[in-house]
Amino acid sequence: MAARPVVEVRGLWKSFGDKEALRGVDLKLHDGETLVVLGPSGCGKSVLLKHVIGLMEPDRGSIIVEGRDLSGLSQAELNEIRQKFGMVFQGAALFDSMTVGDNVALPLREHRGMKGERLSALVEEKLELVGLKGISSLRPAELSGGMKKRVALARAIALDPDIILYDEPTTGLDPVMAEQINELIRSTQRKLNASSIVVTHDLHSACFTGDMVALMDEGRIAFYGTTDELTTTENEAVRNFIARGHPAATGAPGGSGAGPACADDPFA
């Protein structure tokens, strides 16, 4: 019998006024898997992510997280479920008034009541895991865009979550830094054996980081398959996505932990 999905989205619908943001979305995330939700701006990717973490309620359909339906849960029960997630926001969402160390320490203080040397040691451990050893005293304003993303990931994994969510992790970064973030997503999955959902409009990032890819188009899942299937499909929605000028995968540079890199990409 197949293992139960870590996250399952069933028949999800969501409208804002006359705008249908999600139109019957079905998806599954399995243990240890990275699922990329790919698509242009405005297709419903971020709305889907907010439903998965319980920040929005669907008009119809359901979200099942580790066997629990989020529909009808109390606020306390939702907060318990949310601690299974780590979230890396599009703009990093660091608190400028706090040091790097305090940003990473925040969920540990709030949810675990940690303090003192134990807290400091764990903060340094998480920063080292994302390649930022020894910067806990710096402020976010002193960091590059890529470093901010790494700090955001360190904060996201502070509570050792089962599931990590990434909202447009490479947006606003130059190609070299974006590649480093892609590699970090793969290496984090390998080190922590976490299940991940990566929301992106970048096809190269999707091919590099993903095990499975879902292409969203006008609130629906227009394609679902492996990265190899993505780059060989005749699916009209995939072809249209490329034709609209979205960056094609051209094969990722080598490196430890790299996932499928679409090296034979017919779109390149």
Image (spheres, rainbow, N blue to C red):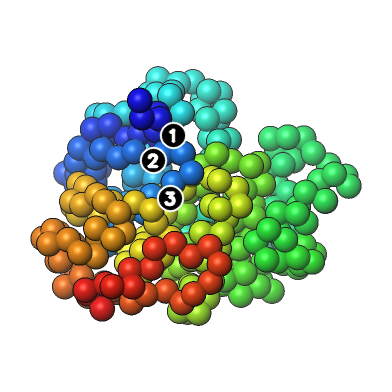
Q: With respect to residue 123, does 77 lie above or below? A: above
Q: Amino acid at mark 1?
A: Val
Q: Amino acid at mark 2?
A: Leu
Q: Amino acid at mark 3?
A: Thr
- Mark number displayed over residue 84: none
Could you tell me if residue 94 is visible in this image? no
- Mark number displayed over residue 29: 2
Q: Secondary structure at mark 2?
A: strand
Dot 2 or dot 1, earlier in sequence? 1
Left or right of residue 33: residue 267: left
Q: With respect to residue 13, does 103 lie above or below? A: below
Check disc 3: other Cα within 10 Å, few if <14, some if 14-19, many if 20+.
Answer: many
Q: Which residue is tagged 3?
A: 34
Q: Position of residue 99 (x, y in %)?
A: 74, 61
Q: Position of residue 146 (x, y in %)?
A: 57, 71
Quarter the N terminus occupies: top left
Contact, CB < 8 Å: mark 3 with mark 1?
no
Q: Position of residue 62 (x, y in %)?
A: 32, 28
Left or right of residue 51: residue 87: right
Q: Position of residue 94 (x, y in %)?
A: 61, 58
Contact, CB < 8 Å: mark 2 with mark 1?
yes
| Measured Cα–Cα span from mark 2 to mark 3 | 8 Å
Check disc 2: other Cα within 10 Å, few if <14, some if 14-19, many if 20+.
Answer: many
| Measured Cα–Cα span from mark 3 to mark 1 | 11 Å
Left or right of residue 226: residue 154: right
Check disc 1: other Cα within 10 Å, few if <14, some if 14-19, many if 20+.
Answer: many
Q: Which residue is tagged 1?
A: 6
Dot 3 or dot 1, earlier in sequence? 1
| Measured Cα–Cα span from mark 2 to mark 1 | 6 Å
Residue for point 30% across, 54% down: 226
